[in-house]
Image: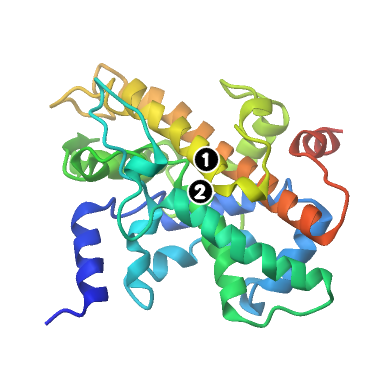
Amino acid sequence: MFSSIKLAAFIFTLAAPVQSWQTEVHCQIGFMAEHFLHETATNMIARILEPQYNGSIGRAAGWADGVRRTPHPYSYGWHYISARDNPPDDCGLYYHRDCQAGGCVVQQISNQTNILKQCIADLGDNKYPTELKCSEALKWVVHFIGDVAQPLHTSERSYGGNSIKVKFNGTDTNLHSVWDKEILYAETGVNPFPADEIHPYFTNLVSRIVKDEFRSPTSGWSLCDLDANRGTYCAEQWAKDSNSIVCDYAYGRYVNGSDLWTGPEKYADGALHIIEEQMAKGAFRLAGWLNALATSTMGSAHVSNQRLVKQISR
């Protein structure tokens, strides 16, 4: 007989997107974010993470995927939010309506941020946060800010696209997997990406952030004031941003029966530009969030991402 926790995990397995960005892509988003971290945030991270991560949120970013079934099966549903939408005809996400029982990515960005704030405050008081919950809270936050940038983690339809069978480069797969990894792997010829250092493809995305070369300007990416006391609000805005893509492109441009890589609609070409920008947004927001947490909680002067970008570009 299932225990209640195992039963909950089983239900989440049926209803949830099975993966956000591929695990090593999460690591790459973390490595990208490291380019925009303030020194105070870098020091904070090094003091909180376990030694095996060598102070790197990139190396720690995949941890949350590895514990979804054991030892933390209750966390399976934390990686997404099931907006009750009907793309491509209707999209819209509302936290109080759509956050599923057991928690969702918006709620957990806020919850784990609150835990992390206390851990960082202890650092400011020259206490060393030896409790495992501090390291885990940081790793949850790192991972979930990446998760919420994946559009299909913000829609309930077809379990985030997992039950929509598609062809990609002649291979049977599903729509969710196409957005998670297939387009990136096909475009770069890399499978998998390294989990211990940044790959040149992602270094180029960092350069594009610095040069502000994406479709939307980086000045509008935070969608909130990066106020750690408004974790739910910020995370909801990020989720809404991703959910809009579900209607505009993920389902809006999808043609049933067409190969999404080779088809005449060139679905993958347009999706690639969106995926790159969403990963860049995830990295940029993650850095800004950790910078805001570290500088506000530890008493240092806050340095905005925009100022750090200017410093890097010199």
Whole-percent x, y for residue 61 in the image: 54, 60
Q: Where is residue 151 shown, x and y percent of the image?
A: 39, 37
Q: Nearer the viewer, residue 47 or 81?
A: 81
Q: For this view, does 223 lie left or right of residue 246? A: right
Q: Nearer the viewer, residue 190 or 120?
A: 120
Q: Quadrant of the C terminus?
A: top right
* Front one among 19 and 189: 19
Q: Of callouts 1 and 2, which one flags the residue occurring earlier in the amino acid sequence?
A: 2
Kind of residue at disc 1: Met
Q: Is residue 46 visible?
A: yes
Label 1 residue SS: helix
Image coloring type = rainbow
Q: Residues within 10 Å of mark 2 (few under 14, many from 20)?
A: many
| Residue found at the very far front of the displayed protein | 96
Q: Which residue is mark 2?
A: 146
Under tag 2, what secondary structure?
helix
Number of residues whose C-alpha sits closer than 10 Å to that of mark 1, classed few (under 14), some (14–19) or many (20 or more): many
Q: Quadrant of residue 110?
A: bottom right
Provide residue 126's location: percent of width, then percent of height: 84, 76
Amino acid bearing label 2: Gly
Q: Residue at x 69, y 53 (%)?
A: 290
Relative to 68, residue 212 above or below: above
**Residue pointed to by mark 1:** 279
235 left or right of 158 in image: right
138 lies above or below 47: above
Q: Which mark is residue 78?
A: none
Placement of 256 over or under 232, stated as above or below: above
Taking the spot 46% from the left edge, 40% from the top edge, the residue there is: 188
Provide residue 21's location: percent of width, then percent of height.
Answer: 41, 49
Q: Which residue is drawn at the image coordinates 55% and 61% (left, top)? A: 112
Query: In the image shown, does 167 or 156 lie closer to the viewer?
Result: 156
Query: Is residue 224 left or right of 304 when viewed as pictured?
Result: left
